[in-house]
Image (cartoon, coloured by chain):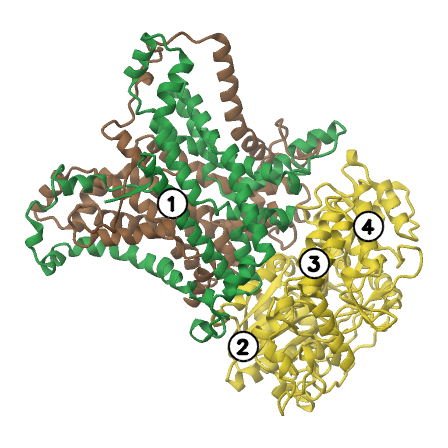
Chain colours: A green, B yellow, C brown
Amino acid sequence: MSLSTDERAEQARTGAAPERRPVVQRKISLATRLKRDRSMLLMTVPAVALLVLFAYIPMLGNVIAWQKFSPYTGFLYSPWVGWENFVRVFSNPQFINAVENTLTITLFQLVFFFPVPIVLALLLNSVLSPRLKTSIQAIVYLPHFFSWVLVITIFQQMFGGAGLISQVLRAAGREPLTIMSNPDTFLLLITSQAIWKDAGWGIIIFLAALSTVDPSQYEAAAVDGAGRWRRMWHITLPALRPVVILLLILRLGDALTVGFEQLYLQRDAVGAATSEVIDTYVYFQGVQYGDWGFAAAAGLIKGIVSLALVLGANKLAHVFGEAGVYKRS
Amino acid sequence: MNTNQDRQRLMNAPINRRSFLGMLAAGAAVVGVPSLLTACGGTASTGSTNVGGIATTTDHLPTYVPITYAEPDYPSVNGSLPGFEKIPEEFVQSVDAPPGKGSSFTAMTPLWGTPPPTTGNQYYEAVNEMLGSTLTFQIADGNEYGTTLATALAAPKDLPDWVSVPTWNIPPRFASEVVPNVFQDLTPYLAGDKVKKWPNLANIPTAAWSYSSFDGKLYGLPFPTGVINDSIFYRDDILSELGITPDVKNGQDLIDLMVELTDPGAKRYGAHDMWTAATLIHSVVPKWKLTDDGKLLHRVETDEYREALEWNAAVFASGAVHPDVDNTWGKQLFWDGEVVVINDGLGSWHENLAQMLGTNPNWSQTPFPPFGADGNDPTYYKGNPCSIFSFLKKTDDEARVTELLDLANVLAAPFGTTEYDLIANGVEGVHFTRGSDGLPVPTELAASEIQPTYMFLVDGPEANAKVQYPGFVKESSEFTQLAASYAVEPVFWGLQISEPDQYASIGQPFEDLEKDISRGRKSLSDLDAAIETWRSAGGEELRTFYQGILDES
Amino acid sequence: MSNATSEVTRPLDTITQGKPPVRRRRRSKHRPAWEEPATPVGLALKGIALTIVAGVVLVPLYSIVLTSISSKRTISEAGGMVFVPGEITFDAYVQLINGGVVGRAALVSIGITVVGTIISTVVSAMAAYGLSRPGTVWHRPILFLFLITMFFGAGLIPTYLWVSQLGLIDSYWALILPGAVSAFNVLIMRNFFMGIDNGIIEAARIDGASDWRILWQIVMPISRAVTAVIALFYGVGYWNAFFNAVLYIRDTEKWPLQMVLRSYVLQGQPIPGSAGTSVDVATGDIATLAVKMAVMVLALVPVLLVYPFVQRNFAKGVIFGAIKG
């Protein structure tokens, strides 16, 4: 997820853009400012209330990671067990397996999914007819708006044992496909699903970046004798670089998050050994098996590592002179 | 539509892969906190308990006062369901007046079908009127009931007043945390002769009550069941069309038959996943096997288990299994004739008749007579004394508990009573008409309104009275009598054992393994490795734990 | 502002600033003069590639829709999914609309989507505007409150326990409230609002308009595009939400459509028909597969209906700054 923005606020503070209240603010008392901005603050109240209620209070609820928690005694009365849950998490082979599966999926998709939207964007960018281009865009964005249940069902109807393709194979006297339930090809399957659903939508950001390239650059390069491929290498691809870096950072921050619903829905078909990822593991240990403190600890570890990854990657981007996701003011 | 058919959907669970989990859950997942293990003394009012929360006394159990309202044509043999071929002339009203006080209660039950309409439902109205109180149902998806229960029990505040719990859906930490914190202890109400206030509850066999007890206290209201739950069925209508007369005497015969029946061109396959069949013909124990020298072997360690896996792998390797085995409900394929042999709960038999006879008058299925994989007699292990029980939400309001027990007494009325008839068949003239032979003929309204709801809460002793299908009671009763003659009680049968928490999940890997080995994705050496892991992950301690229970009893 | 406060940048917005998608080459169908003419091979390859890309998306959808309106005979002749049109019938849909479960689930989903989208969009727009004017007191700490939630989630377990503590189990609100505000969407809107010329707002203020009036009567009308996109994001989120229902809904009567889709189509349980029996049993001449596909189409339709109206807004550059890749 990409963050946006306070560009204009920045400008505002540096005086580049008109201030909302050009009067010198520092001299106004807090009470006056509160009174003046009363309505503006009130507008944020519902959203803030929802965030507090459904994001911040649950964040505090992570204290149960240090408890032998039972919903029947509540977190006030459940016994504190120190770091026991964390120790159990790290020494649990199923958790380690879930982490391995998660990282494998992330890496695999980084190699095989990540470049797809870039290629698609370049392809689409080379389409000259605006009508055709818009139509193709409309088509490829579409699956992004389908639910995972729907996407997996579509895959099942196409590639399942009784799906369209198996039907053809069977008619030809061949064995039907088993990829919907074969753990060995599961990585391939979920990556194909991810590509089908989201690769199209992914191109939107690259197309935006491409649209910013000044055409005169191409013209100048062409006049200098640069061919199609050289122009792509020296003009188009560099234009995509900040976006690519931004997305890589975000992906890194999400490294421990791989399609929860997608995997949850297909867990039965291929078994937990292949499909268990951190999120599904947390769910099953907590909600299904009632080991609340343990599951909360596992979830918390994931949350903290993810946060560290985003911050770290962002720092790295700064080191390389890129804007990254956010910057300190 | 009839009720028992739906009650027995319960027993159809073994068709999917939840079955093993279910069986494990029934035992393994019933866990006990350490405090339970030490609290041997029990309390004055209830029985004392041993290791595993097993009562050493029977003071907490209700006195058994059997009543008979109708004589079965096929009496129970070794625990088989009694069969009734005809409806009694007169139904007996077993409870004089509506016992309820007009209160409203909520109840949560599983359903393997379409939720009935909630407004204007004449069936609900009629039964609630008979009860004198209003029961409102929250109907949850039966196939996901384990998930639903787990999430519901974690929010005790929002729990309905009355919760149905299938034994295969018992969530982890149930005995240790859930039962004592969430549910009402019924011992003070039902122990000993106190139950006589509710004669239909007193008519429930002791084993079922015993199985509904936790830590020496009575918590559950049982739904008693017969001892034979699963069978291997085939579509005899299709076989006779093909001119095949099955003669299956051993495991190889069955595989050969299923291969013979397979014709992908005609979209016909011999088998669905035959894992339950494999455990049946190999006489795999439900949980523990007592060896001749008095040692306990876990199910997964037994030769029978290994052979069953090998056999099921051979079934898959033979190509007779439907390619959609992992993503289409077996029952649907069986209905459609795409799968000709299937293992399923006994109850599916008449359930399928109800489903299919309307559109396919020739529909017929029949079970293979019992056989062992090696051609010898099989050993069937009896199922739990009740396959489902229900619990009342904990309350300090004694009047409310008494009122709910009053209602339970009505719901537990056995075959031959007006109460049973209303719950099973609905209102005459609305939900059914009487045919010339006095048998009920369900109306269309019955199909949508009468779904198993009340009966998933509590039930009298189970009976087979599917009189509406010609020949069914005879055929099925004779089959179950025969099958029951091979039935023995597995060690620890009928005991509600609370295992310590840490063993709750060590059996999980086997569920995947059963699938993987069957499908040829893993080999028996993986089983060896998994058994080793199991032993070191607490399996040995679990064995010691059970050995302790064995030694004490 | 203290050093500790993170300031969010808009890398892409920086790029696109002042240049809303320029239609350089698109303005004319002709190739720019400096570009070399296309080779026939290149054109052919491009054509093939585009056809494949479009086909990969459209073919499955085509087959699903076609199967849902095919007769039982056509389906059994095809041996399953239909690819070549045969007998056309809408019986499967009639069956679904008459039959209790699927129709009810569709209504539940529509209700949740409509109510949820309205709440989310209104709340987000208000928050976005409240935070969009630089200099507003406390706007930075509040903004920070939003940002944190994008980097650190509470986790499933505490969230679940808390929602159940709130008594939302089996309540439709459990499907709406926990995800009602997405910080990401608020920031997109805020980003857009910040681009609105301050002069308009100041002028309105001088005329005595309150901030509320400015928001509804000035800001919102000129922010239709971004609002439509955000509403689509929220709406699609609600429509597609599946796992929340697994967690919070136990009564099958309250199931949203995605749950029904999973049970009856993905897991292959028999679809209940109006008479309480399975659909194909109740009505012997409708194929089960057609009904399943009709459920899928039902789940697709709202997305397909709304999408074209919003899709053109994607191109307006309002959200490029913050689209997820």
In the rendered image, which quarter contains the N terminus of chain A? Answer: top left
Residues at discs 1 and 2 both on one chain: no
Q: Chain of mark 2?
A: B
Q: Chain of mark 1?
A: A
Residue A312: assigned label: 1
Tag 3: Cα neighbours inside 10 Å, few (<14), some, or many (≥20)?
Answer: some
Q: Is residue B88 visible?
A: yes
Residue B181: assigned label: 2
In the rendered image, which quarter contains the C terminus of chain A? Answer: top left
Residues at discs 4 and 2 both on one chain: yes
Residues at discs 3 and 2 both on one chain: yes
Q: Is residue B338 above or below residue B100?
A: above
The residue indicated by pointer 4 is: B310
Secondary element type, mark 2: helix
Q: Is residue A219 above or below residue C132?
A: above
Badge 1 amino acid: Gly
Residue B533: assigned label: 3
Secondary element type, mark 1: helix
Badge 3 amino acid: Thr
Q: Position of residue B135 (x, y in %)?
A: 55, 72
Marks 1 and 2, how far apart in space? Answer: 45 Å
- Circle nearer the viewer, 1 or 2: 1
| Mark before the other along the chain sequence, 4 or 2 | 2
Instruction: Name the side, left or right, on which B141 lies relative to C235.
Output: right
